[in-house]
Amino acid sequence: MIKSMTGFASLTRDDEMAAVGVTIRAVNHRFLDLQLRLPPAVADLEPRLRALVQKRLARGRVEVSVSLQMRLAPVPDVQLNAAFVQALSAALSQARADGLVEGGLTAGDLLRMPQALAIRERLADGGHTSEGLAALVEAVVDEALEQLDRMRTHEGDHLRSDLAARKDLLGTFVDNVVKAAHTGRVDLETRLLERARELASALPIDQAALSQEVVRVAQRSDITEEVTRFRGHLDHWDALTDGPEPCGRKLDFLLQEMNREVNTIGSKADGLQVSELVILAKAELERLREQVQNVE
């Protein structure tokens, strides 16, 4: 399946508890690089939201931002770092014993130390409202992912058309290079035989053995195996793009294999036209590779 890795989605939903806004931006990346930005009140939802995104997306650098406006005022939650305060008190007691400081540890001292107190906000109704809010946030994120998927699919349709047209050009290349290679092989055999006849006029040569050697040399330029594999890669391309799974990384690997076959064809096949066709094919493969970098 061809889907673009780039996309954008933004929406807001609310109920009696809160208004939730979600913005998702996605751009190209070799793997799935997910960044979540959540307000403190729902920070514990990160694993659940991360799993939700991973079910939908296979590749891309994805930024998910969630904003939250509570209908109910949050309740402050103050937590004391008892271990830190005890260690601090013991150190101050020793300092007083050594005559280095005077006075005791006050509440004002603790408020000035971020290590001593952690002040957070929690929802007013405890677990019941928290679970309801979690469901709302997940629903909005899921809806935004659906919106993003529609955009990526729409862009993927354009990518598919462009890739298919370039892939068809490679199919034409295969047909043309087979003809050009055959012509080049025939020309090579003709040149070798003519040269052999020139030598035969001055040296005694076994004509049967000479003909066999000419054929053997000409067969080194046979590209049947490379052409067969290249056509197999084109068929595999169709299977990947028509299948239900994301195929960007597989298409990228397939293009590497096609490029390898084209290089071998260029080194084996004889003839000026073959060289021209190989240059054109390599240029088209590079254009395909650049486009495939946009495919999920």
Image (cartoon, rainbow, N blue to C red):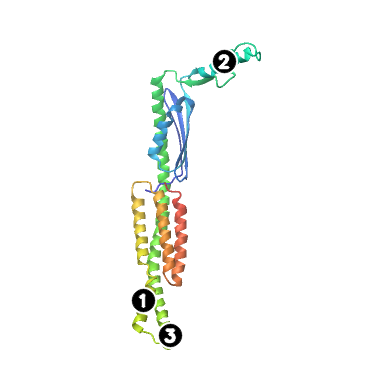
Residues under numbered marks 3 and 1 in contact, where contact means CB atoms less than 8 Å apart? no
Q: At label 2, which amino acid type do we have?
A: Ala
Residues under numbered marks 1 and 2 in contact, where contact means CB atoms less than 8 Å apart? no
Q: Which residue is mark 2?
A: 90
Q: Which residue is mark 3?
A: 199
Q: Is residue 30 above or below residue 162?
A: above
* Residue 275, percent from left and from top: 46, 68
At 33% from the left and 53% from the top, the residue drawn is 239
* Residue 204, percent from left and from top: 39, 87
Residue 13 in which image quadrant: top left
Cα separation, mark 2 vs mark 3, equals 106 Å
User: Tag 3's secondary structure?
Assistant: helix
Residues under numbered marks 2 and 3 in contact, where contact means CB atoms less than 8 Å apart? no
* Residue 175, percent from left and from top: 37, 66
The number of numbered badges drawn on the structure is 3
Q: At label 3, which amino acid type do we have?
A: Leu
| Residue located farthest toward the front when viewing the structure as drawn | 98
Sequence-earlier tag: 3 or 1: 3
The answer to whether any part of residue 169 appears in the image is: no
Cα separation, mark 3 vs mark 1, equals 17 Å
| Residue located farthest toward the bottom when viewing the structure as drawn | 201
Residue 215's disc is 1
